Image: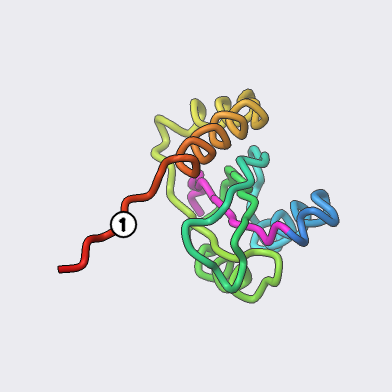
Amino acid sequence: MALNTYEGMFLLDSTKVAVSWDDSVKHVHDILTKHQSEIVASRQWDERRLAYSVDGHKKGTYLLTYFKTDGTQLKEIVSDCHLSEVILRELILKVHPKLADHLVNQAMTSTPSLEAEEGRGRDEEMDDRPRRRRRED
């Protein structure tokens, strides 16, 4: 059984994350470990306003996770994510073996607070711009 490294980006319900971040992360990790996955790195990526409503939610918190598992387990992991009330969306990508160590090290050393401040600054700039109206002919 060959283990591959995967990058999982999980969009979590911000209201449930606000109540207990640790329980929300544990919920995602439990899904992964249930299917024989080894969690290599995991951290909060950001909390952002969503471009469009996802299941009635306008904000979401992203959890970036790197894990190792057999590719045959992915279907069950995705199925459990769809049944979860905490996870709104998931995106799981296979990481090329040459990039795996670099990406995991980067995820473990990055500071989410700096990224969040940069992201908020861009959102605020976009919100302050005057919006152009469409001319009706």
Residue farthest along the left direction in this orientation: 137
Crowdedness of circle 1 by 10 Å Cα count: few (<14), some, many (20+)?
few
- Local secondary structure at mark 1: loop
Left or right: 1 as drawn, with respect to 108: left
Q: Position of residue 63 (x, y in %)?
A: 63, 48
Residue at horizontal 65 percent and vertical 47 percent from the top: 38
Per the picture, the main secondary structure of the magenta-coloured stretch is strand
Quarter of the image where the C terminus is located = bottom left
Q: Amino acid at mark 1?
A: Arg
Instruction: Specify start and end residues of the magenta stretch as a single range.
Output: 1-14
Q: Which residue is mark 1?
A: 133
- Which quadrant holds residue 82? bottom right
Q: Please state which of residues 77 and 63 is positioned toward the viewer in this rendering.
A: 63
Left or right: 73 as drawn, with respect to 15: left
Residue at horizontal 76 percent and vertical 55 percent from the top: 17
Residue at horizontal 48 percent and vertical 34 percent from the top: 100
Q: Please state which of residues 51 and 35 is positioned toward the viewer in this rendering.
A: 51
Left or right: 50 as drawn, with respect to 30: left
